[in-house]
Image: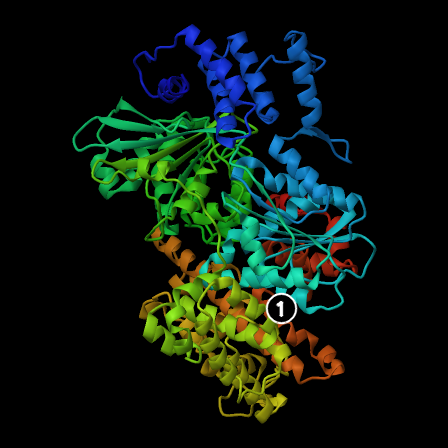
Amino acid sequence: MFDKLLEKLFLEDKVTDNVQVDLDKEEIKKATWLASIAALSDDDKERNMANAFGALLHLTDKENEIYKRACYILQSRTGNLITSSHIPKLFHKENTLSEYGTLLNFELAAHRALLEQEFSDDTKVFFTEFQKKLWDSLNSGENIAISAPTSAGKSFIIKKYILEIVEGGAKNIVFIVPTKALINQVSNVLKSQLHEKAHVYTTYITNEEDDLATIYVLTPERCLKLLQDKNVASPELIFMDEVHNIESGSRGVIFENILYRVTSAWSSTQLVVAGPFISSLSDSIKKICNISIIDHQTMSSPVFQVRSALTFFPSKKVARYKISSPTERTISGEIKLKKSLYSKIKTNKGEALEVIADMFSPEDHNIYYAPKKNLAEKWASKIAPVIASKNPRIIEAADSRVKDLIDFLSEEVHPDYSLIRTLRLGVAYHHAGLPDIARQEVEELYSESIIKNIICTSTLLQGVNLPADRLIVISPKVNSDDMPAFDFLNLLGRAGRANTKLYGEIYCIDIVDDEWGSRKLEAEVNKTVDTSSNLFLHENEERLSLIADMSGAEIRDLTGDKNIYSNLSYLRSIFKTDRNHFDRILSNSGIKSESVEQFSKKLESLYNNMSIPRELISKNPFIDPVLQNKLFEAIQSQGIGEWLISKKPLTKGGSDLDYVAFQEKSYYFQLWSVFERLDSIFNIEYELNSNGFSQDNYINIGRLVRDAHRWMSGKKHKFFIIDLIGEGNHGESEVDKAARRITGHISKNLTFIAVKYLLLWSDMISYFLSEEEIEKNSYILNLPSMLEMGSYDPVVLELMSCGISRSVALSISSKVKKMNTSAEKALAKINKEALPNIFRRHLIKAGY
């Protein structure tokens, strides 16, 4: 009966003929009775099915009073009252339930009382049973490893918990997000909900103004600065989201190291980590941290999903559907089409999506997944005219907020940017190459139903909160690689919005000679997470002693793998800086004791001729300590005066001649000299170009320094794009390509790679200075933060540390300077009515 109801729902809006799915009333009664028993099961799968059955029953006949009541009873018993708001006329005007009979009235009222939660701000919500148990564990102060689908509401619970503990007097909280793209999204939510009760900072700065709580929303990289300050009070809570990143190659060791260091530094702090669909997550955490931690795992979701694969055939106006049912059976059949799509899906997926987009209601929220940035842009351009033809009122951006975003993009990126045209037609795209404020606006416009169709890349896998009624996947890849089953399951979690609908839909679009859809949908994913270090040790056990003292170039020649050198550099670092942790990692890895012994001996001999202090290695544990030692000895032998930049940016003074002494050079040429010498040690140019850039796009040190200086001088993306392609009119594809190159260059080369080596330079220089000298040179030693955030201006940096986007911070900094107060206080006072609408909304969203 479940499968019949599921097929009926799937076919209802797709076939013009009357849908004939046989529904016998006695069978429905029997199936509902069985579902009411399954609803009380301890098994997630059975409870999910019971909840979904109730929704299916209601959706098959929305006016049927008995089906409505059955649906509500099943929602109540499965602990899923969140979605009961989608069942009309359940309650009387005074918010009391209709009459169900004495026993059921008692049961339903008891369940409502059990799952209702009132917060200190007098708001009330209904938790799911999973959320209720998680809430109780959080309040008991336990360390928790959460594994749950995207739609299970774990982030909602964590944010509510933060609000409650701040109300209760908590003074210091650290919220670790996987990417810079998520920093402002999280900080804005927290700041807007906490208002004047807490400072929310997106980089590490000390709060010396008042007694308010301090919440840091940081990437793992930005946590390094926090950990270096020994005077930081122990946080009451550390939350790390998307924790499965601990196994993601060279960046995985950063997550792993930060997790270890925060638990070592603050052993009494409550640690909460979260990820999707991970079995025994606590075991993975215990490999890194010596702490007691419990699992909170669920596969339950408040909304159920209709997961289908549509397969197209050559020269046929039909598509075969396969619906992957929670009953673990596959429902299949055929639907008629207006035209055959086989050749388009095979050769031009964008054109195929044009036709597919036409199949859906203009009122639904759709996400189309694209494997690459350029495809997201291309496909958005393809489906936009179709969407516009179904929604005449959105032509030419009838909504003022869309117009505001278009004006911003024209000024910040380029007037010929393709996103401008697609927005006018009611479609957006979303990828890591958009400027921060544009990405946030797109998310907001989509969440508030102003834009209902969006093309997304794998940014969706990184915790961006964009739930949809429907997810359409026509290519299950990330760039050119097959998407792993775990990531695919995580992607599917975006389909279904508990606040708008009882269910979400997933369409996998494939062709008869490449039927990946049903295969992906039916794949069992029992994911466990291992650490990046562990994976490295297992994969390289036989050659550990061979590569232990090799250079990066030698390792790449031997293995062809860039990640090996990164992981090895980290193990080299902690061998010296934290031998106990090193030994623990190797003993937990399970590799042979003789491999461990030989590897350790090689590392011991590696340090015999090194003079770099241990404390310096520990500040930058992801850069090869052998090369760090070369830099240390170079500064020591040449003298600090040959490495410390003495001139200030944006001021005149010093020579631009190549042959003059370092101290006589201008600021710009001192910066260039420092980077050239860093490159001679660390081969930065290789790292900049290791993704196979063509000769036309080769980034040398001169280009890096030039663009770094321009970025810190406050130049917009548009400046760099015009610098690349010249003034005048350009085609959308040329502008889009330039915009992708520039945003990639800024996010990877300038604000990640160059920042990493500037941070090392700053730490090394500081080591050779007295406290008074450090204070005297504090401005220039802060160059790493200036480059990462994109400004030489301390006021702009202060504004950005409060969660304000760079574009807005640059725009309002002159007004803030006139107010002669801290940036945070100025943000509350500044006249927002005088600002462009998009900037005014940004400040209000950020809680000011």
- Residue 550 visible: yes
Give percent across and percent down for residue 84.
59, 21
Above or below residue 83? Residue 422 is below
**Residue 336 falls in which quadrant of the image?**
top left
- Image color mode: rainbow
Give percent across and percent down for residue 555.
38, 75
Task: Please give left or right for residue 614 compared with residue 253 in the image.
Answer: right
Which amino acid, by three-letter code, is at mark 1? Tyr
Give percent across and percent down for residue 425.
42, 36
Residue, far left: 315
Q: Residues within 10 Å of mark 1 (few under 14, many from 20)?
A: many
Nearer the observer, 775 or 743: 775
Above or below residue 351? Residue 49 is above
- Give the residue at x 48% y 38%: 494
Task: Please give left or right for residue 273 compared with residue 44 in the image.
Answer: right
Above or below residue 528? Residue 702 is below
Question: Which residue does the numbered mark 1 point to in the structure image?
Answer: 792
Q: Secondary structure at mark 1?
A: loop
Nearer the observer, 553 or 108: 108
Above or below residue 587? Residue 640 is below
- Residue 729 visible: no
Give percent across and percent down for residue 640.
62, 88
Task: Please give left or right for residue 652 compared with residue 6 in the image.
Answer: right
- Give the residue at x 65% y 36%: 133
Nearer the observer, 701 or 616: 616
- Give the residue at x 47% y 47%: 461
Residue, far right: 211
How many numbered discs? Answer: 1
- Give the residue at x 42% y 64%: 538
Q: Quadrant of the N terminus?
A: top left
